[in-house]
Amino acid sequence: DETDAHNAPSHFDGESFPAGQDRLSALRLETKLGLAAGDATRGRRALGQALHTIQDFHSHSNWIESGRRDTNRDVLGLDSSTAIARPGSSSTTCQNCTISLEEEADLRSREFDVGCQQVCKSPTDSHVTPLLCVLFAGCNTQDCANNLFTSGALTSGYYSEEGPEYTKPGDHKCSHGGIFDGSALGTEGINKDSVIYTRSPHANLHKDAVVVALEATKEYVRSIHDDPDVTPEQFRLLMGAGPTLAFAIDTTGSMSSVIEGVRTEARSIVRAKLGTIDEPILYVVSQIQDPGTHYIATYTTEAEFETAINNLGAGGGDDCPELAMSAIINALNAPSEGGTLFVYTDAAAKDVDLASEAAGLARKKRVQVFSMLFANGCTSTEGFDLLAAASGGQVLQLGSASEAGAATSLAGALGNSDTVGIASITADATDVALRRRQEMNATTLIKVPVDSSMTQLIFSLSSITAGLLITHPNGTLVNDTDPSVTRTELTGAQFYIITSPEPGIWTVGLTGASSLGFSLTISGISPLALTSFDYVELRGRPGHEGYFPVTSPPAPDSCATVLAEIDGAFADATFQYRTLGGDLIANMTFTNGGGNPDDPVEGSVFYGNVTVPTGNHTVYVIGHDGAGLAFHRVLGATFLVPSSNGTMMNSTNSTSSSTSMTSTSSSTPSTSSTSSSSSHANTTSSTTSMSFSSSCTTSVTSTSTTGLTMSSTTCTTTPAHSKTKSKSCHPT
């Protein structure tokens, strides 16, 4: 509705049935072309536009009012579909709605009108009768139940501002209706978009339209699956039913031995995943080379990928710095969203000025970037550090080319469909808080709750001097000889992969000095995942608004609206802001649902208003799984705050509201909960005397006259020993 708000065929408005059918046929073809090109984003965009049009047919036409509860296959273009003629401009389809205040006073029959139920059925003033409430509040004073003529002909409502061809020819035609439609008088019309009569005159049929539209959606998607021109690999790509395996490989002259190691391990990884849910749906190979030689290719089958990687060779690159960031940007542009990118090079980035662009793209697409840097005379972590910090990945400094194969084994562990982030810590010599925490208890740098859904744990440490010390929930150290443990030791990295880990609280510490800084990522295989956390804003045509990701990140210390989603079974959840060192900044108070009062969503979707931290930060969700065991999940992407000169702040400079936090969240949050909020009490332990919390409170005012909900938000940031500091945010 944001891009096609006033295009009638996009919504089957104005009896635009022939053009609507043509649109669906064109979008089906566009979906197939996108898949044939290996472009999931293109295919999904076309499919999404088609599904919007299909669902609007059931909400905007009289198909439901005609008593039909089956799918109109002609509209979908299925089988040997017949073109639907557009009714003549002089044919009468509708009459004006009638005013029936007496009927409106009996609000028991208006169970779908949420606004009138709340405002009119139980008025705050005991002297105001339901009838008076109707008169003054304007609760659906129009009765549109019988405004359609029962001729059996297919029609749809006209909406204002959709061009001269689709302008309502007169009152003998149906309007879309609702307070935002200029073609209608009052609430006259036939749309079933919502459950509120002031927006949807036929709101009582909203649920029926939803049921039939859902079945039509399934049939349309099924038709693409069954299309002989769409291969099984292409359909899996469209549905995102598998991971993306992506490489950016330096193919200049000095990388010959590294390429061979990567080639051998990558083939082994891919072959082991064939026929499983972890078989990649997309393979990406981007080459780091000299100016003018940017090679990027995508493949949807294992055979194509093997051929491509077997043909990789080393050559050129007479000067040491190479165009790494350009190749990384090419690789990040290939997948639609999600996954992991593995970078291999022995050279500094000649185009390091593009690192911020690459980091922003990695964060936007939620792709973790792991850079394997092999020792050479001009190797540098500049730019790669920023990529790792922004994406939740790592920079692994390796010794010789002989370590390439072993380093690539990390790609096999992380390149699964159900890979989730559990925790992430990045620190350098300036991170005093983390250093103090480590000095106080070297064996317990972080506690890691393993819930009942976890089938594998992956610990990845990047450090030149430190090693990992991992302890089971029963207090025993992880032993390398345990058959469930695979340990990989490299020059500047260490991996532990543990299969079938026992549920409970694991602890992780460091052995040896870590004065040069380190990064630690802890991942796992689990269906319980933090899948999204987006700053959003309300956009779209009036009456059809939706939440869209903001075009630019919200300013530090400002109020913002968030939509977040968790997949999998869980009992309770608390969202948190934390520093990149893992310290708690603030808990967030969210509510279940999509943020739209007309169409509440329960369960895994959350929304709320937050105060954006002033320093670099990441997002965690903690809680209990369906079995009551504690879980932690961390968002793959992190949020880096620009400094005053426009460059990104140091990746570990992560204070909030000018106050350094050094408290670590307990791994066992309380199970107390309420039905109105997803925020639950949690226990924290702290190495300093200060605690810090931040929340936004929203007061909601609903008016049944317009069906609008206005909210005024106050965000509060409170150190434990100080007075409350609050500010009022814009309405949302």
Image (cartoon, helix red, strand yellow):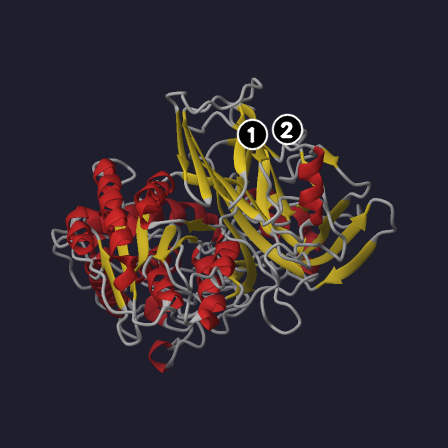
The one of 150 and 41 positioned closer to us in this rendering: 41
Q: Answer left or right for 214 relative to 308.
A: right
Q: Is residue 495 above or below residue 3?
A: above
Query: How crowded is the residue under tag 1: few (<14 C-alpha within 10 Å), some, or many (20+)?
Result: many
* Left or right: 620 as drawn, with respect to 496: right
Check disc 2 and report the residue beneath it: 668
How many discs appear?
2
Whether residue 549 appears in this view of the structure is yes
Residue projecting furthest to the bottom: 164
Residue picked out by circle 1? 449
Q: Is residue 149 visible?
A: no
Q: Nearer the viewer, residue 581 or 125?
A: 581
Image quadrant containing the C terminus? bottom right
- Find numbered disc 2 in the image and state the secondary structure of the residue it sits on: loop
Of marks 1 and 2, the one in the foreground:
1
Any mark on residue 68, and which? none
Counting residues from the start of the chain, the first of labels 1 and 2 encountered is: 1
Residue appearing at x 21%, y 39% in the figure? 271
Give left or right: position of 467 versus 17.
right
Closer to us: 576 or 474? 474
- Crowd around label 2: few <14 · some 14–19 · many ≥20 (10 Å): some
Across and down, in percent, residue 695 comes to 72, 49
User: Taking 327 as reference, is 66 above or below it?
Assistant: above
